[in-house]
Image: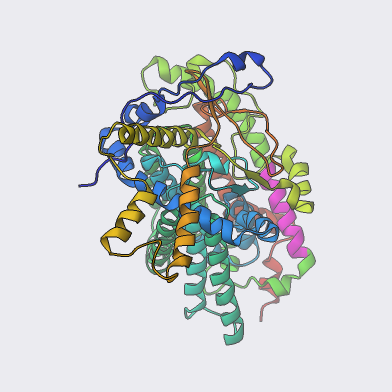
């Protein structure tokens, strides 16, 4: 039976020095007693079994944090900061969502479908566990968070979606390279396998280096990614054969299963964007399966792109035409998103209000019901997967000067960070008070545990002839980082908002951010994402290919030229 992490009870927090909020001098008058409302937050927000699970896992996050900080401190350089911050983008949803359709348009249809499956499943199931466990990322300080994404730190830490994505892609690619369908030479195969291993290791180690995840996060994420790829490689072909040989009931069953999984996705304790990403990829899966089923059964162009009789050849088509197809396809996807999203955000609130009146609404925490707002802003930034057209200048500036897009933050960055900072601080305070009163500490610190282990083994940590000097120096560094845990600046202005101090890499105080409610989220966004991303996937695997053939940039001429 695991015991809950210490610090889960009630108690009062030592005052935290108040700081001005957005230049408001009134904040200087606030004397903060965190109270600890953070200690009871997860008990109130989570079902009992999920709260117990969280409390069992939380000590692992706390235990590994100083070791992560020691690792980061030992290997960190400016060059590695830039490298890992930039390469982290190769494990993001945006990278794959933009890159995957290109595989379908350039003749790698089977491989592209496999990648969509493993990535969608990885994003969904890691997000499922993140919201279910509601575990924070390793504390900062002592860690420094290095990232180019402003939203990444808002998610929970366990497990790592980046690691699941990277490992699943690498494992699936290696399995494909070792299969009978591999068309590459032995030398090319070895080079591609080495690239796959390097890619996965770079992403996984980068999550540790950047202070975004702990050892347990990346290990479990990597295991999930491996399992997902193995299931996809060995069992997906049989499911695909069943799908393509069945009538319309097959894609309908798949779509219903996906919708049920979205509905049972756990409610998070904090405003975490994991659910948004899961919904988007659920839409992608529905559109992919429905679109590929229709294309395989009813499209006159199916033999060009599908099956053993496929005649599509990227080399035969030529690079100019291939690039033109990609540009045209991407423009069609953005046109769909730019047209459909505003239309849905304008129409759906009326439908949702009608459903509320007849008692058919399905409320979800952190989403405002339609009865409580009049209109949804058409330019609400609710999309973490594909950037808006208006965001492209910023994206291009980031590509041209990636160093400017990188930030190194010290201190809590999300509500989960804040609650964990306060909880750990309260734990240290209670241990100090119990020690001063002659009581027995409920749980020793890492330093005291190491000292106890050394005494029990009969090793004098100070008089061993210098044999353990290196170990002692390392333990001293770990102990130093442990003392920094829970020292992040946290300012509670009132019961509704928490304000946290964040530093950039220059050490200057940034504008304080409201983190408990980073933005208003509307109930209609869920269905909007499902429809928009279902359409994006359907366009990519079906309608865009048909359009290519109709306007003369398809692969139909390859069939006529084939002997």
**Residue 33 drawn at (x, y percent):** 46, 21
**Residue 51 drawn at (x, y percent):** 31, 36
Determine if the magenta segment contains residue 491.
no
Is residue 119 at all visible to an observer of this figure?
no
Viewed as shown, does residue 531 lie left or right of 132?
right
Name the quarter where the C terminus is drawn.
bottom right
The magenta-colored residue range is: 321-334
Viewed as shown, does residue 485 lie left or right of 376?
left
**Relative to the observer, which residue lies in front, 118 or 472?**
472
Color style of the picture: rainbow
Vertical relation: 315 (above or below) 392: below
Vertical relation: 466 (above or below) 439: below
Q: Residue at x 41, y 42 (%)?
A: 135
> Main structural element of the magenta stretch: helix, strand or loop?
helix
Q: Residue at x 48, y 15 (%)?
A: 371
Vertical relation: 515 (above or below) 200: above
Q: Residue at x 57, y 81 (%)?
A: 189
**Relative to the observer, which residue lies in front, 52 or 165?**
52
Residue 104 location, quadrant: bottom right
Is residue 429 at all visible to an observer of this figure?
yes
Q: Residue at x 67, y 40 (%)?
A: 504
**Relative to the observer, which residue lies in front, 228 or 555?**
228
**Residue 123 drawn at (x, y percent):** 47, 50
Residue 77 location, quadrant: bottom right
């Amino acid at each position: 039976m695991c015991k809950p992490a210490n610090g889960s009870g009630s108690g009062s927090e030592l005052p935290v020095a108040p700081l001005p909020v957005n230049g408001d001098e009134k904040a200087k008058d606030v004397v903060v007693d965190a109270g600890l409302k953070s200690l009871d937050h997860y008990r109130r927000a989570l079902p009992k079994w999920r709260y117990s699970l969280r409390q069992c896992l939380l000590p692992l996050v706390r235990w590994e944090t100083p070791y992560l900080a020691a690792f980061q401190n030992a290997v960190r350089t400016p060059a590695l900061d830039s490298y890992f911050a930039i390469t982290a983008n190769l494990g993001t949803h945006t990278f794959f969502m933009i890159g995957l359709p290109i595989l379908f348009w350039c003749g790698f249809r089977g491989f592209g479908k496999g990648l969509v499956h493993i990535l969608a499943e990885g994003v969904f199931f890691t997000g499922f566990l993140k919201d279910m466990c509601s575990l924070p990322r390793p504390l900062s300080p002592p860690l420094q968070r290095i990232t180019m994404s402003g939203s990444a730190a808002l998610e929970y830490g366990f497990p790592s979606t980046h690691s699941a994505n990277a490992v699943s892609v690498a494992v699936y690619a290696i399995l494909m390279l070792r299969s009978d369908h591999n068309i590459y030479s032995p030398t090319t195969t070895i080079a591609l396998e080495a690239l796959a291993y390097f890619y996965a290791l770079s992403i996984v180690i980068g999550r540790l280096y950047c202070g975004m995840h702990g050892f347990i996060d990346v290990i479990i994420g990597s295991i999930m990614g491996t399992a997902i790829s193995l299931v996809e490689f060995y069992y997906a072909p049989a499911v695909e054969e069943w799908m393509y040989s069945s009538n319309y009931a097959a894609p309908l069953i798949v779509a219903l299963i996906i919708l049920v999984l979205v509905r049972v996705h756990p409610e998070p304790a904090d405003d975490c964007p994991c659910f948004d990403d899961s919904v988007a990829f659920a839409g992608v899966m529905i559109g992919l399966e429905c679109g590929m089923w229709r294309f395989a059964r009813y499209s006159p162009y199916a033999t060009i792109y599908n099956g053993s009789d496929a005649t599509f050849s990227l080399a035969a088509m030529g690079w100019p035409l291939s690039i033109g197809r990609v540009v045209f396809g991407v423009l069609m996807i953005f046109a769909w998103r730019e047209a459909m999203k505003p239309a849905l955000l304008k129409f759906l609130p009326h439908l949702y209000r009608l459903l509320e009146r007849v008692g058919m609404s399905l409320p979800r925490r952190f989403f405002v019901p339609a009865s409580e707002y009049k209109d949804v802003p058409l330019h609400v930034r609710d999309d973490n997967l594909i950037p808006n057209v208006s965001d492209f200048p910023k994206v291009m500036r980031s590509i041209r000067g990636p160093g400017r897009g990188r930030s190194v933050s010290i201190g809590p960055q999300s509500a989960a960070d804040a609650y964990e900072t306060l909880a750990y601080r309260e734990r240290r305070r209670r241990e100090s008070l119990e020690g001063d009163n002659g009581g027995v500490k409920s749980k020793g610190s890492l330093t005291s545990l190491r000292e106890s282990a050394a005494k029990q083994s009969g090793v004098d940590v100070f008089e061993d002839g210098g044999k353990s000097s290196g170990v002692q120096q390392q333990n001293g560094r770990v102990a130093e980082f442990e003392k920094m845990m829970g020292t992040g600046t946290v300012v509670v202005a009132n019961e509704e908002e928490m304000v946290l101090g964040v530093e950039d890499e220059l050490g200057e105080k940034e504008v304080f951010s409201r983190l408990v409610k980073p933005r208003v989220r509307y109930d209609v966004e869920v269905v909007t994402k499902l429809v928009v991303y279902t359409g994006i996937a359907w366009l990519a695997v079906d309608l865009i290919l048909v359009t290519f053939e109709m306007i003369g940039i398809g692969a139909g001429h390859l069939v006529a030229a084939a002997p």
